C-alpha cells in the first residue's frame, strides 16, 4: 500500500537523501508535502519531480518567488504554496500523510513534529533538537497516541536495530559512537585559531552547517545522549560514548548477560533513512552498492572522549541531569554560538563558554508543562546568547 509522505526540511541533506530512497522504492510512497527554508531552486525542482499537494517555505515573501520559479519551469499542476510554522503543521498533519520525516534545521520543525505525533502520524526523526528541547512532551504524546518515533540519525538507528535482539529490561548500557570530528588530534591551545572552513571539513560525513560544527565540538554527541535517553527510555548513566574514527560501528547495546550487539555499515544516510521508512521490513537499497567490506576496513579503533578538548559533552550531560527546560536552553545557546562562529563573531574555543554562561543565567524550572514553555525558553536562551557574545569575545 502506498504511504503518504511529508518531509520537513526537504532541501537539506537528509531531505534530499530521503527522496533518493523514495526513488529507489517506486510505488511505495507518494510525496504529499514538502517543507523547506529558502532554497527555492531545489524545492522547485522537487515539486516538479514529485508533484506534492502542498509546498511550504519559511517566509511569506518567498511564496510568490516559488510560484514565479515554478511558472518559469512550466509547472501547471495544482499546488498549495504557503509559509511559516502554521503551514508546517498543516503539512505534517495533512489527512493524506501517513509518515513524516522531521529533518528541519535546528528547532524550526519542533511544533510541526509535535503536532504530527499528536495527529497519530508515524515519525522518522532526523532532527535532534525535537527530543533535546522537548523530549518529555514528545515521547509522552507518542505514547498517548500509540504512534512510533523511528530514529534516522545513524547512531540512534543503530541502537534501535540492536534493541531488536532483546527486551528493554535486559539492557545494561547503550554505547554511542562518534568519529571525533576534524579536531580529534588538534592541540587544545590551537582551538582559538580554528576557522569555519576548517571546522566544516568533517572527515566522514557530508552534512549541514550546524551539525558539522556540532560534530567538531562534539556537541552533537551530547545532544545524542539526551536524545537516546528519551528515545529508548534508558537512564543517563546507562548511556556511554566512545570515539570511533572509522565510523563503521554506528552504535552498540550491551545486555545484562554480557552480550554486545553492534550495528555496522558504510557511512551512508540512505541506510538509516530507508530503515525508518520501511520498518519493520528490510528492503534492498537500489543504486550504488552499500555492502561493508571488512577486509578493506581492516582495523577498528575505539577510545574515550577527551573531556578537556570537548567540554560540550559535560554541558550536555549537565543539562540532562538538571532536566526540565535546561536541554532546550543548551540547544538554543549552541545554535546561536554556532551561527556566531560561522559568521566569525565568536572563536571556536568560546562556543562552550557561551553555552555554559547561558545555562548559568537560566536555571531549570522543573517538569515541562507545555510546548509553549519550551518555545519561550528557546527564545529567551537565544536572546541571552546574543547578549553574551560581545561580552565573552571582548
Image (tube, rainbow, N blue to C red):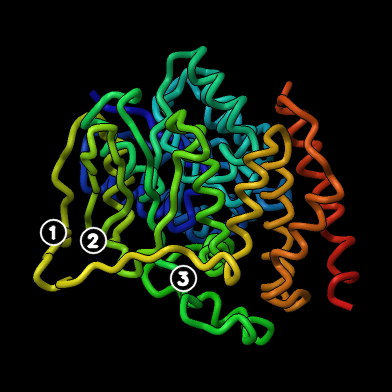
Q: 10 Å neighbourhood of mark 2: few (<14), some, or many (≥20)?
A: some
Disc 1 designates what residue?
A: 291
Left or right of 257? Residue 196 is right
Q: Secondary structure at mark 1?
A: loop
Q: How many marks?
A: 3
Residue at the outermost left position: 295
Which is more N-terminal, label 2 or label 3? 3
Which is more N-terminal, label 1 or label 3? 3
Does the rendering let one see residue 233?
yes
Left or right of 180? Residue 392 is right
Rendered location of residue 84, percent (x, y):
68, 40
Which is more N-terminal, label 2 or label 1? 2
Disc assigned to residue 266:
2
Q: Residue at x 71, y 32 (%)?
A: 324
Disc assigned to residue 181:
3
Q: Secondary structure at mark 3?
A: loop
Left or right of 322? Residue 197 is left
Q: Residue at x 60, y 27 (%)?
A: 136
Rendered location of residue 232, percent (x, y):
43, 31
Occupied quadrant, residue 249? bottom left
Occupied quadrant, residue 253? top left
Cβ atoms at labels 1 and 2 below 8 Å apart: yes
Does the rendering let one see residue 81?
no
Q: Secondary structure at mark 2?
A: loop
Name the one closer to the observer, 301 or 85: 301
Rendered location of residue 71, percent (x, y):
52, 53
Occupied quadrant, residue 296? bottom left
Left or right of 387? Residue 5 is left
Q: Residue at x 34, y 25 (%)?
A: 168
- Say above or below: 77 vs 352: above
Amino acid at each position: 500500500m502506498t504511504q503518504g509522505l511529508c518531509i520537513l526540511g526537504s532541501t537539506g541533506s537528509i531531505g534530499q537523501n530521503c527522496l533518493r530512497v523514495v526513488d529507489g522504492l517506486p510505488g511505495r510512497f507518494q510525496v504529499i508535502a514538502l517543507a523547506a527554508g529558502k532554497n527555492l531552486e531545489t524545492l522547485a525542482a522537487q515539486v516538479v519531480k514529485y508533484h506534492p499537494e502542498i509546498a511550504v517555505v519559511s517566509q511569506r515573501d518567498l511564496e510568490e518567488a516559488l510560484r514565479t520559479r515554478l511558472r518559469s519551469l512550466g509547472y501547471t499542476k495544482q499546488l498549495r504554496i504557503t509559509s511559516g510554522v502554521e503551514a508546517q503543521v498543516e503539512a505534517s498533519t495533512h489527512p493524506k500523510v501517513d509518515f513524516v520525516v522531521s529533518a528541519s534545521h535546528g528547532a524550526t520543525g519542533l511544533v510541526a513534529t509535535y503536532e504530527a505525533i499528536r495527529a497519530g502520524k508515524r515519525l522518522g526523526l532526523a532532527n535532534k533538537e525535537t527530543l533535546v528541547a522537548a523530549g518529555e512532551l514528545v515521547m509522552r504524546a507518542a505514547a498517548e497516541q500509540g504512534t512510533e518515533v523511528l530514529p534516522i540519525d545513524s547512531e540512534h538507528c543503530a541502537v534501535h536495530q540492536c534493541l531488536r535482539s532483546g527486551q528493554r529490561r535486559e539492557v545494561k548500557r547503550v554505547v554511542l559512537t562518534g568519529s571525533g570530528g576534524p579536531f580529534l588530534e588538534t592541540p587544545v591551545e590551537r582551538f582559538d585559531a580554528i576557522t569555519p572552513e576548517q571546522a566544516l571539513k568533517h572527515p566522514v560525513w557530508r552534512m549541514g552547517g550546524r551539525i558539522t560544527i556540532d560534530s567538531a565540538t562534539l556537541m552533537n554527541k551530547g545532544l545524542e545522549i539526551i536524545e537516546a535517553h528519551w528515545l529508548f527510555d534508558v537512564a543517563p548513566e546507562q548511556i556511554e560514548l566512545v570515539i570511533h574514527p572509522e565510523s563503521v560501528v554506528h552504535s552498540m547495546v550491551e545486555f545484562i548477560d554480557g552480550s554486545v550487539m553492534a550495528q555496522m555499515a558504510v557511512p551512508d544516510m540512505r541506510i538509516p533513512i530507508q530503515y525508518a521508512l520501511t520498518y519493520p521490513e528490510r528492503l534492498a537499497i537500489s543504486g550504488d552498492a552499500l555492502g561493508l567490506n571488512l577486509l578493506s576496513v581492516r582495523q577498528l579503533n575505539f577510545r574515550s572522549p577527551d573531556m578537556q578538548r570537548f567540554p560540550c559533552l559535560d554541558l550536555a550531560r549537565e543539562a540532562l541531569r538538571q532536566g526540565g527546560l535546561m536541554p532546550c536552553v543548551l540547544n538554543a545557546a549552541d545554535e546561536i554560538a554556532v551561527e556566531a562562529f560561522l559568521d566569525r563573531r565568536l572563536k571556536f574555543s568560546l562556543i562552550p563558554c557561551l553555552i555554559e554562561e547561558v545555562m548559568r543565567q537560566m536555571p531549570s524550572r522543573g517538569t515541562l508543562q507545555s510546548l509553549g514553555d519550551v518555545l519561550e525558553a528557546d527564545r529567551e536562551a537565544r536572546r541571552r546568547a546574543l547578549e553574551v557574545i560581545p561580552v565573552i569575545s571582548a
